[in-house]
Amino acid sequence: MTNYTFRPAQRKDVNLLIGVAGGTGSGKTFTAMRLATGMAGAKRFAVIDTESGRASHYADQFRFDVCELRSPFTPQAYVDVIHAADDAGYPVIVVDSMSHEYAGEGGVLDMQEEEFARMGSRETSKVASWIKPKTEHKRFMQRLLQVQAHIILCFRAEQKIEMVRNPETKRMEILPKKSLTGLEGWLPITEKSVPFELTASFLLTADAPGIPKPIKLPEQLRPFFQLDRPIDEAAGRSIAEWAAGGTDLRQAHRTALDAATTLPELAAAFAAAQSAARDAKDHAAMVEFVRLKDEKKAALEAGYVTSTGAA
């Protein structure tokens, strides 16, 4: 009989796979770079740019090295360039954009069309024509999950609608498409299984650039992201520290409360802290968060009085 060994579970050196999706003007690239800067600490991070050099527009704002990936955007090309960055020792790799692996020139969709044409474009060949591209994509995902660096994947997103019958009026209505991999009708342009592999993912929209709308956000990661302000370097530092094995949930909320610079930010951080404490049935944490909130509120109000010169 084969011997199996079990040991106590320990959160340490967790590899993060973060998704950032959005349409034009939503701040995907800028947000990914802010997050990567915090996650990388004092080190430079890598950017794999499929967007014709757009990442380099931010060269004066962030410390990173760039590799411009050209078509064909095959799954194997992504495997090669991501592992090259990982082998070079970069702590964080930003891929902008991951959508080209699926819908770009030479990507999965093009591979299927080529296979379909090679098989004679017969309707009976349509299912078979997906075997090779899906196998290549699956191999890419398996290799992606073996990378040691943290990875941030940027996705283009597009709005989808669907016809739904209203149960009361019995009439068909046009509504934003519901999906487990998207939000508010916005779906990332990628192979449908990719979002399920992500540690966390966010939708960004042009009306509020950089402000995250969670598509997938596990409870243990919620303290690190403020949902009423743009994702920033502080979020990157916090999530990287958590992944390395530090920063328990209570400490994360302490940090969020201390980082608040306005009363509305403090209120949002306190609400998140109390919610987490209630869910954990941690009465001591609830008491502590009230104390920290009151202390921070007093400090902010004192600062406001000083800055305005009021008596």
Image: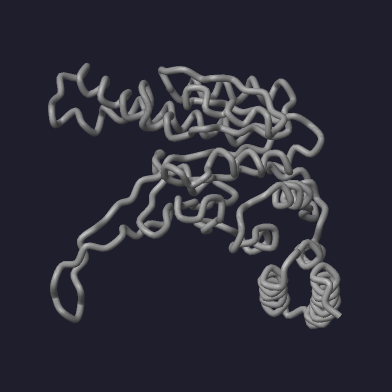
Q: Quadrant of residue 162?
A: bottom left
Question: What is the image's colouring?
Answer: one colour
Q: Please name whichever residue, 190 or 126, is drawn nearer the observer in this view of the structure.
A: 190
Q: Residue 8 in the image: state x and y as whole percent.
A: 80, 55
Q: Residue 301 in the image: state x and y as whole percent.
A: 80, 75
| Rendered-image quadrant of the N terminus | top right
Q: Quadrant of residue 56?
A: top right
Q: Residue at x 70, y 52 (%)?
A: 235
Q: Quadrant of residue 310?
A: bottom right
Q: In this view, does 33 lie to the left or right of 72?
A: right
Q: Total number of numbered labels?
A: 0
Give above or below for 30 relative to 93.
below
Q: Residue 125 in the image: state x and y as whole percent.
A: 19, 28
Q: Is residue 189 left or right of residue 152?
A: left
- The reply to whether residue 281 is in sight is yes
Q: Please name whichever residue, 148 or 174, is drawn nearer the observer in this view of the structure.
A: 174
Q: Which residue is drawn at 20% across and 74% down?
A: 166
Q: Please name whichever residue, 229 or 69, is drawn nearer the observer in this view of the structure.
A: 229
Q: Residue 42 in the image: state x and y as whole percent.
A: 81, 35
Q: Which residue is drawn at 30% across and 30% down?
A: 130
Give above or below for 228 relative to 131.
below
Q: Which residue is drawn at 47% across and 22% down?
A: 52
- The reply to whether residue 6 is in sight is no
Q: In this view, does 128 lie to the left or right of 1?
A: left
Q: Please name whichever residue, 188 or 194, is drawn nearer the observer in this view of the structure.
A: 188
Give above or below for 12 relative to 191.
below
Give above or below for 160 relative to 77.
below
| Rendered-image quadrant of the C terminus | bottom right
